[in-house]
Amino acid sequence: MRYEYVKRFIGFVCSLAILSGCTTSQSESFQDEPLSENHKKIFIGESHYKRGNSVYFSDTEIKNADSATFQLLDGYGYYAKDKNHVYFEAKLIRKADPETFEHLEYPYSKDKNYVYFQEILIRRANPETFKHLRYAYSKDKNYVYRHEKRIEDADPDSFQSLSGNYAKDKNYAYYLTKILKGADTDTFQLLVEPYAKDKDFIYIGGKRIKGSDPDTFQLLYRGYSKDKNFVYYGINKIDDADLDSFEVFIADYAKDKNAVYSRGEIIEEADLDSFEVLVGFYAKDKNYVYRFGKIVEGEDPETFKP
């Protein structure tokens, strides 16, 4: 019985060796075969390459591209053209004229007829007077744009780009493409994204912080701020927070002489005297372990390690 088992085992090992040899032999024979011309990658810059009659951007085929006349138009590989079309990365820029096309400051381009944001045509933009301003804004003699969208009622002559999201002209202040109703354009200024202010209000993400005082407003840390009257988390006032003792920690935790907070909300169970902030959004006190301000069930604060 034992003899039969050994004999079968030896036969199994020999079979594996034979199969391994066949596989190795076949693999070596495949490796020895040179790639055909249709399978070779011929790189054009860092992101584009040709293979056979096709052109690729980062392994995405550029549909209908003419390999023979395909060429890059900038040193970064964003724009390219052939005898028929113009491309942004792997995308066709519809209506673009290859003969007169030119790339401007990224991500804008133009030809004799149109202006483009990446591969998107900016409707009504004038290619002769088009100008990229700072950040996300641009203008021509008639209109102002954010990316490919026209800002209604904006004044091109007085328009100022303050950041990627805020702007103003002689009439209005703007967040993205929307007018900030009631904003004082003369005193409107950027603080630090996403905050701005005028003589009357503080704004975050284009929304007023109700009750805020622009003259005494201070940015703290991790979304917290305060003025002479209140403490805020984002756009929301933190009721009953103590201004003088309020301090902010990492991971959205804060405390004052009365309470501990996570993302602007009081942690009702937290012990003020023993509370400490750990890493990875964890915190603990003598009674509990917390993550994102919520009790982590089953953890012992004396032995817990994040």
Image (cartoon, rainbow, N blue to C red):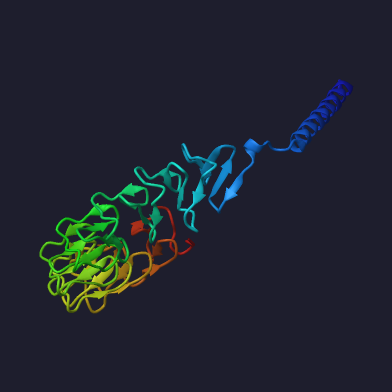
Q: Residue visible at 39% across and 64% down?
A: 284
In the foreground, 48 or 131: 131
In the foreground, 187 or 207: 187
Q: Residue visible at 78% across and 36% down?
A: 28
Residue 17's quadrant in the figure?
Answer: top right
Left-right relation of 267 to 53: left
Left-right relation of 229 to 51: left
Residue 12's quadrant in the figure?
Answer: top right
- Where residue 91 sits: x, y (%)? 42, 44
Residue 189 visible in the picture: yes
- Where residue 187 sits: x, y (%)? 16, 75
Q: What quarter of the picture does the N terminus occupy?
A: top right
Identify the residue at the far left of this view. 182
Residue 259 visible in the picture: no
Q: Is residue 161 above or below residue 53?
A: below
Identify the residue at the far right of this view. 3
In the foreground, 113 or 38: 113
Q: Residue visible at 37% across and 64% down?
A: 251
The mark tally for this picture is: 0
- Where residue 111 sits: x, y (%)? 35, 52
Q: Is residue 168 above or below residue 20?
A: below
Residue 4's quadrant in the figure?
Answer: top right
Left-right relation of 296 to 254: right
